Image (tube, coloured by chain):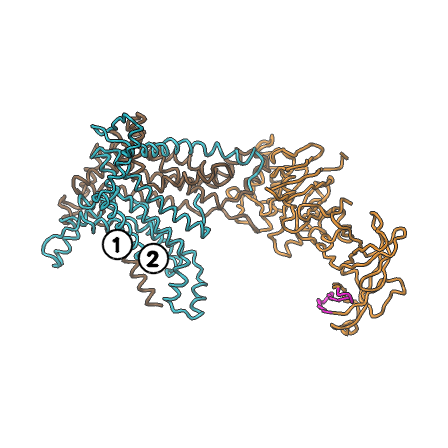
């Protein structure tokens, strides 16, 4: 469809895309490669890298996989497991909480209200994740609002440890990721053809059946997108677990940061980072296969 | 049916309350008289006054703005060009480029931050505001590309052909026809980059050198030390700024021009 | 090349991958004429138009405009302008700015441009519309702005890509007449793409009928209509009555046929080689040239075929008859309702009648594309 005039159509793309290739190639792909290579290296005395004398022997002895092997230690497996189940719980809670909201805004609410409601959903989506997480710190602390209210209402006699545990991390995660679930669900529900719902009712299906057999399947792409948009960031989460979880709730992201900033063990940190990346990429490959089968719109 | 609607409405109201209550509380207590948080003593601007005279914080705000502005300009230009390439032409490496552009969004920030700091170390680049800008550009290009690409897909190509037909050369066509029509998308992309940039903590924490502390980094260290109303005040200001920017961006995100049909 | 040829298309082929959208097309479009490219969607007419405009480059062949080869010239360097199917008015510019768009690339100053814009707008009855925006205009008005914008540059050739498609029926007819008048008064060569044969006939001096990338027939509008050269053209122009027969003899300019439905006809040979005796041929007669009679008129030398009435649709001014001959061939007859109502109303489905026509109205068909005529 493009005009042939002005030179070959495919050649004209190169000057446009070259700068991006250069920047992403040098400052994104290359660093990732460096990180990958380092995951096979050994930690030096002062946090740098130990020079390897005999590369051949190093490889053959299997030593180069030492960090990956180490990550299979129960302590770390526990961390990975916690990351996974937290991400799963967060996703499920977000889905259950968000679907009715998205449904209400997209289907039930009067059209003139829709823009306003959508705006109200979008604003948290854009505002600082850090600040929104801090808000829960503020509320859940021992002297925080939650405890004050609980004690004032007589439900408890002394402040509860609401902060620095799995519970607070989950709240923080759900709170932070909720808009990321509502928006794709809304987008999917908004496109839903109302006449399909009416046809279902006309054919004798009660509301629950219509929901189960028509609404859910037709919004499956939105559900899938929402799940990915919540699960992936939750898996690689750092801020929420660092601020709201403290020392008790370490997730994969905290582990990586810890290895780089505190333990100064870059090789091990890199290995964990790549295991995290592998998990994420696997998930996304699955999602990509799913969308490809359905022939959905691509973003780029 | 009426009852179900009421139930949905209630649920939605509760969820919205859940979404906004913490923020509202935060904002409210930034005006609290005492530093003994959660006990309301009285209304005051004290913390804001302290904030605005706090040299350190002002310095980090300046850093954030510098980084934000620089990253926005660079990422917007690169992302727009990339969107044009992806949306217009078929070229060798197109699929790979698409995946390349998805990666910065997909790969966890922790990993990207770790990779960058390692790379800078190996390459001998000292950590500074420059490295922060580089990092921000890297993860922002993709967002701009996606936003502008969306705008382009509704774009009527015959408008460009008409311009060529009337005597405009390709470059002239770009500036007189294409750019004005995709500009809302470009600006929306730019605003997106800016808000992401001023909010970023994780990646920035890896690549910021001494003296290159940005606002989120400063806030974070304040949080780790302890909760004070000053933090509330900073948060409120940051929130207010973001909201204004969003509203502005929403105003610009109008649907692309319709095909001119009879 | 003769001086009166505006656009010379020579052996032009355009391939997209394996398929040839345009296949070895050669046409001469004369200066000052209204030339239509007519055909169904996918026949290549728009692709051919776009190649004249410079938006596609021919895979093979050449295109010359006013004697100069322009095969590889980009659109902004051709003395040709296009009116796009959906008008392509710049939505962010006013009507005046739209029309003045191309004038920026001419050596004219601001006031001169303004005068030219006003001049052209007046020509298209859009005076005073300079400050309006495209989204404030009706379909017909937008179309005129698109025309004004193209004509402001005084092109040697104006290309029009199905510009009337988006207009409603009544407006279409009005605009067809206006366009024709405009073209006549300006004297510019118009190349018009359409899939509507009636539209092409209304406006064009000459028509090229295209099918699957090839030109099936090109020539004067009336000639293409009355004397289709191929089966496709016949069908497309609505002459869907196909008679088959075998050649008895071919003396001079006529071919005597034994019709498969019975009877004989002496059909004029319209140029080309004479068919041999015994050869099977087909010819076409337009529906309005067919006549239904109660009696067999063969003795009077009028070809008559015995038919049975299958269906009859009364349309007030005319009646459409569907009839079938002994061999099962179907024919459509358009008849002006001149006959007294009582008489023809007795002819109901099942009636046995005779299908008659003048031999001179029979058009012999050749297999495959006819050239320019």
Q: Colour of chain A?
A: cyan
Q: Which residues are magenta?
A: C310-328
Q: Quadrant of residue B149?
A: top left
Classify the position of the N terminus of chain A by image quarter. top right
| Secondary structure found at label 1 | helix
Residue A122 tag number = none
| Secondary structure found at label 2 | helix
Find disc 1 in the rendering and name its residue. Answer: B18
Is C262 displayed left or right of A140 in the figure? right
User: Which secondary structure type mostly characterizes the magenta part of the structure?
Assistant: strand
Q: Colour of chain C?
A: orange
Residue C302 percent location from the top left of the image:
86, 62
**Crowding at mark 2 (Cα within 10 Å: few <14, some 14-19, many 20+):** many
Which chain can be seen in brown?
Answer: B
Q: Chain of mark 1?
A: B
Relative depth, front residue between A146 and B256 = A146
Relative depth, front residue between B221 and B167 = B221
Residue C219 percent location from the top left of the image:
76, 46
Residue C326 percent location from the top left of the image:
78, 67
How much space separates mark 1 and mark 2, taking CA atoms?
15 Å
Classify the position of the C terminus of chain A by image quarter. top left
- Residue at 34% over, 53% down: A182
Find disc 2 in the rendering and name its residue. Answer: A99
**Crowding at mark 1 (Cα within 10 Å: few <14, some 14-19, many 20+):** few
Residue A201 percent location from the top left of the image:
42, 68
1 vs 2, front mark: 2
């Amino acid at each position: 469809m493009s005009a042939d005039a002005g030179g070959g159509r495919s050649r004209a793309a190169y000057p446009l895309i070259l700068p991006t290739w250069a920047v992403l190639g040098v400052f994104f792909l290359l660093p990732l490669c460096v990180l990958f290579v380092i995951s096979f290296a050994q930690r030096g005395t002062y946090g740098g890298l130990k020079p390897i004398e005999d590369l051949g022997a190093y490889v053959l002895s299997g030593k180069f996989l030492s960090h990956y092997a180490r990550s299979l230690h129960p302590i770390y497996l526990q961390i990975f497991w916690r990351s996974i189940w937290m991400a799963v719980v967060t996703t499920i809670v977000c889905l259950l909480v968000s679907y009715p909201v998205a449904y209400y805004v997209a289907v039930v609410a009067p059209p003139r209200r829709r823009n306003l409601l959508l705006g109200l959903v979008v604003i948290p989506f854009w505002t600082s994740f850090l600040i929104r997480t801090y808000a829960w710190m503020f509320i859940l602390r021992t002297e925080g609002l939650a405890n004050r209210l609980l004690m004032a209402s007589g439900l408890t006699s002394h402040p509860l440890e609401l902060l620095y545990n799995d519970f607070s991390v989950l709240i923080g995660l759900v709170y932070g990721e909720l808009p990321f679930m509502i928006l794709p669900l809304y987008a999917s529900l908004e496109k839903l053809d109302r006449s399909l719902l009416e046809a279902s009712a006309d054919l004798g299906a009660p509301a629950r059946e219509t929901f189960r057999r028509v609404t859910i399947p037709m919004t499956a792409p939105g559900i899938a997108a929402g799940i990915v948009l919540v699960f992936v960031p939750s898996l690689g989460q750092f801020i929420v677990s660092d601020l709201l979880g403290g020392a008790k709730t370490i997730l994969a992201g905290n582990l990586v940061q810890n290895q780089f900033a505190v333990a100064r063990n870059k090789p091990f940190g890199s290995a964990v980072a790549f295991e995290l990346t592998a998990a994420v990429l696997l998930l996304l490959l699955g999602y990509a296969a799913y969308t490809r089968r359905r022939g959905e719109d691509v973003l780029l | 049916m009426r009852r179900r609607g009421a139930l949905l409405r209630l649920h939605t109201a509760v969820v919205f309350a859940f979404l906004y209550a913490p923020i509202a509380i935060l904002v409210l207590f930034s005006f609290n008289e005492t530093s003994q948080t959660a006990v309301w003593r009285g209304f005051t601007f004290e913390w804001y006054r302290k904030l605005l005279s706090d040299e350190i914080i002002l310095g980090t705000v300046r850093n954030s703005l510098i980084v934000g502005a620089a990253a926005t300009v660079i990422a917007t230009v690169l992302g727009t060009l990339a969107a044009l390439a992806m949306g217009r032409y078929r070229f060798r490496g197109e699929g790979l480029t698409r995946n390349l552009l998805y990666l910065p969004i997909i790969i966890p920030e922790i990993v990207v931050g770790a990779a960058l700091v390692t790379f800078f170390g190996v390459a001998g680049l000292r950590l500074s505001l420059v490295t922060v800008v580089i990092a921000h550009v890297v993860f922002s290009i993709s967002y701009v590309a996606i936003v502008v690409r969306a705008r382009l897909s509704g774009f009527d190509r015959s408008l460009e052909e008409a311009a060529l037909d009337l005597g405009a050369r390709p470059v002239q066509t770009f500036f007189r026809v294409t750019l004005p029509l995709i500009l809302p998308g470009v600006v929306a992309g730019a605003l997106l980059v800016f808000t992401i940039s001023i909010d970023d903590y994780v990646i920035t924490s890896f690549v910021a050198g001494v003296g290159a502390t940005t606002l989120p980094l400063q806030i974070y260290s304040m949080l780790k030390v302890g909760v004070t109303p000053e933090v509330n005040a900073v948060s409120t200001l940051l929130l207010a700024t973001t909201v204004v920017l969003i509203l502005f961006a929403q105003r610009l995100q109008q649907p692309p021009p319709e095909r001119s049909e009879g | 090349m003769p001086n009166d040829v505006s656009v010379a298309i020579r052996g032009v082929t355009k391939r997209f991958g394996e398929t040839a959208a345009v296949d070895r097309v050669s046409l001469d479009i004369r200066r000052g004429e209204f030339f239509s490219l007519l055909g169904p969607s996918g026949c290549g007419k728009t692709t051919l138009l776009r190649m004249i405009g410079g938006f596609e480059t021919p895979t093979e062949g050449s295109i010359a405009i006013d004697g100069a080869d322009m095969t590889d010239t980009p659109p902004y360097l051709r003395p040709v302008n296009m009116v796009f199917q959906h008008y392509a008015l710049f939505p962010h510019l006013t009507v005046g700015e739209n029309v003045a768009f191309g004038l920026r690339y001419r050596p004219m100053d601001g006031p001169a441009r303004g005068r030219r814009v006003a001049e052209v707008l007046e020509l298209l009855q859009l005076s005073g519309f300079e400050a309006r925006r495209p989204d404030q205009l009706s379909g017909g008005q937008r179309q005129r702005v698109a025309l004004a914008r193209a004509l402001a540059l005084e092109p040697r050739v104006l290309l029009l890509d199905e510009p009337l498609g988006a207009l409603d029926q009544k407006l279409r007819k009005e605009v067809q007449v206006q366009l024709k008048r405009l073209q006549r008064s300006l004297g510019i060569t118009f190349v018009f793409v359409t899939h509507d044969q009636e539209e092409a006939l209304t406006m064009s001096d000459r028509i090229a009928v295209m099918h699957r990338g090839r030109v099936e027939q090109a020539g004067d509008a009336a000639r293409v209509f009355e004397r289709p050269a191929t089966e496709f053209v016949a069908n497309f122009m609505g002459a869907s009555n196909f008679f088959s027969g075998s050649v008895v003899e071919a003396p001079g300019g006529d071919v005597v046929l034994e019709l498969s439905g019975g009877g004989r006809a002496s059909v004029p040979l319209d140029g080309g080689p004479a068919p041999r005796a015994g050869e099977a041929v087909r010819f076409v007669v337009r529906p309005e040239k067919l006549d239904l009679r109660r009696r067999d008129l063969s003795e009077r030398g009028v070809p008559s075929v015995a038919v049975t009435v299958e269906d009859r649709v009364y349309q007030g001014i005319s009646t459409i008859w569907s009839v079938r001959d002994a061999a099962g061939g179907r024919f459509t007859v358009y008849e002006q309702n001149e006959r007294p109502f009582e008489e023809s109303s007795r002819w109901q489905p099942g009636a046995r009648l005779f299908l008659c026509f003048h031999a001179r109205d029979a058009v012999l068909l050749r297999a495959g594309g006819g050239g320019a005529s």
